[in-house]
Image: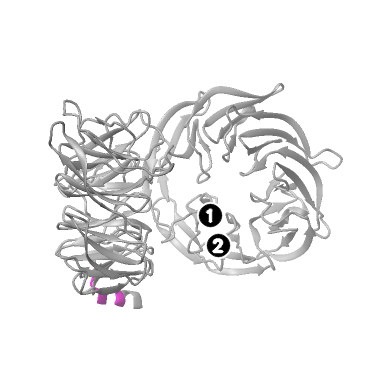
Amino acid sequence: MFSVDAVTAAPLWRASVGPGGIAHFPPVRADAGGLAVLICDAIRPALLSVDRSTGAVNWRLPLPAPATGPPRSENAQILIGCEDGSLLAVNRTTGQIDGGLKFPQSVLSPPVAAGGAGDAAGRRLLLAAGQNTVYTLVGNPPTLEAVSYTGHGSGAIPVPLQPIGRNVLMCDNDRADSALLRAFAVDEEDGEATEVGRARVNGRIDVPPELRGENLFVSTSPERMTAFAVADDPGKNVFSRLATAQLPNPQPVPTYLVAGPDGALWAAGSALRKLELTGEGLKLSPAALAAGRHVAVPVPRISGDRLFTTRLTEAGTATILAAAEARSMEGMSRTVLAPKLLAVTRGERPSVLSATGVLTPLGDGFPTNSGGAATFLTNGRELPGLEANGLDPILARTLPDGGVVAGVGGEEPRAWEIDADGRAGRPIELPSAPELAPLPLGPGLLIATAPRLELAVGRGGRSVSAFTAPVSGGDVPAWTSAVGLTENKAAVIDSAGVIRLVTYENSSPPSLAEEASITPGWFADVPPAVAGDALIVAGSDGKLHRLGGATLNETAVVTLPARAAFEPTVIGDRVLVALEDGTVAGFAAADLTDATTTPLPEPAVGPPGSVGDGLAAVVTAGGVVVGLDPATGEIAGRAETGQPLAGAVFMVNDQPAAAAADGAVVHLDFKPPGDAVAEGAE
């Protein structure tokens, strides 16, 4: 979770909300003063109270099942519903359970106030069941007063119930191409809920409607907005349709709404748009900002004259928090959050390349003295000339000399060579969009675009004849991996299972040529590794193969205990493979003998990596990094990060580090196995 300055949109702090790390509803204020916020861990079900000013976790309450929506916090009590039918009453200060109810089916959190403020029914809460019924609750902690039949289907209620005056609104996706708005009133005598009004809208509802005064704005897919006047007086229609607007070139994405004064409405779906409700309908402003799929955490918010939105980048590689001037629809700031880490340079001044194409220097302050401390990837410099490219993902690899090479497709395919200290050279024009990260070969970069392999040599370089793989039938196999064996030789594998040795020949004219190829009776499950002059390949046959670098003859083979989860890693004279059964298998790289097996506390989320002094480390799904001796397979240490990680470990300034799931770089503080066990026992 990130805390962001409302004026500058700059991150203030970052806090892990648990090893699962997924918050499936926006933070909810725990108290009127907003000193704490509530958030949910959806992987390891738990409700957390987090200090707003520091990000520190005040308390964490494990839940019996995943929460079905945000909690309700009022009068020092929190109510949260779960998929197993539990409704828990939680003390806001301590996080202890004070009471609750257990229903025979899932309940849709949160319960909402029924009857409006100030009357007898206003002390009641209405809670929707997973299907067919709603429950009326009274008291603190709540007890069940009434059960009312509604007939809604399982999974048909896409958003929480919400009050509209003295009534309660239920959104019911009862049809494939339309949805119902249903209003329920609660009887002041017996608590029975009765439907008092309904209206049908075209499209399906994905996000909560927005209520402003007596106007209710509803968004449906694809990017359609409908405005209603709502009333709760007996004898009047609850819903009176005012206007409908369909955005141009609508996309099948959720569209989040925020309403302002004087009929102003902002819609964030495939872009941020502004509308205005007038006597003539919903008028659409021509301005469109922040193109990209907008997301729910958080929903669009207005703070002062600023409107904040959150969206995914066009390639889906990061989240962008953007601020705009609400009235004029002029962009004010843009902050990239949680970018995926692609590669790290390994010089004296290391830099991180993110999937957004930004190079962030880690600086002299990394690593810090405390394990688990993280460095953001929000600030840095974009690769030169990247802006012209669009949806194609950036492909990158770290080189043996500590540098990085990256490439991207799009209308203007190009590549960059980045030195070990993070300095990017001028963009290199590519002959075609790469399927794999460019690979240095001979005087240029090997670019794989099936069925061709081409060499990009930059301006002034001699043209090199391409290699075209033979194609049988109509399908062209895609290239799946490429590794360098020598300065002028690479091994390239395609989706048909063919493994080729391709060399750069400095002839007249220079060319790429196939030196050898094999079509084994198995496929390469993951990219291969290079051990001296040999290729180490994990096959779909469940075996690890050692192939000679001259002819691709098989020099050794061994059966793995389970299928490889990631590519093999060569560390010294050993080869390590993280397996799908949650273990790491080790072998002598020379002949695949001298096998070792290391059990992990949880499955690996990346291949093993070197952490210096001849040791290896593996990142696991629980945020624990396990250090091991490649020769013996014995565990040599553990680093507890308390946050979800991704990929392989790497070195920064001779110190071990890993990538957090949100793109931050985390320093690893390894402790001997005995120390970790002792701390766990406490």
Secondary structure beneath dot 2 equals: loop
Mark 2 or mark 1: name the one nearer the start of the chain: 1
x%, y% of residue 87? 63, 64
x%, y% of residue 583? 33, 70
Q: In the figure, 512 relative to 553: above or below?
A: above
Q: Residues within 10 Å of mark 1 (few under 14, many from 20)?
A: many
x%, y% of residue 98? 59, 69
- Mark 1 highlights which residue? 30
- The disc at residue 588 is none
Q: Is residue 496 left or right of residue 217?
A: left
Callout 1, which amino acid? Answer: Ala
Q: Nearer the viewer, mark 2 or mark 1?
A: 2
- Mark 2 highlights which residue? 66
Viewer can see residue 276 = yes
Look at the magenta stretch and give its main secondary structure: helix
Q: Is residue 337 left or right of residue 364?
A: right
- Hey, which quadrant is residue 648 in on the image? bottom left
Q: In the figure, 300 relative to 572: above or below?
A: above
Callout 2, which amino acid? Answer: Pro
Q: Is residue 422 left or right of residue 476?
A: left
The magenta stretch spans which residues? 671-678
Find out whether residue 338 is within the magenta segment. no
Q: Residue at x 74, y 54 (%)?
A: 152
- Nearer the observer, 293 or 35: 293
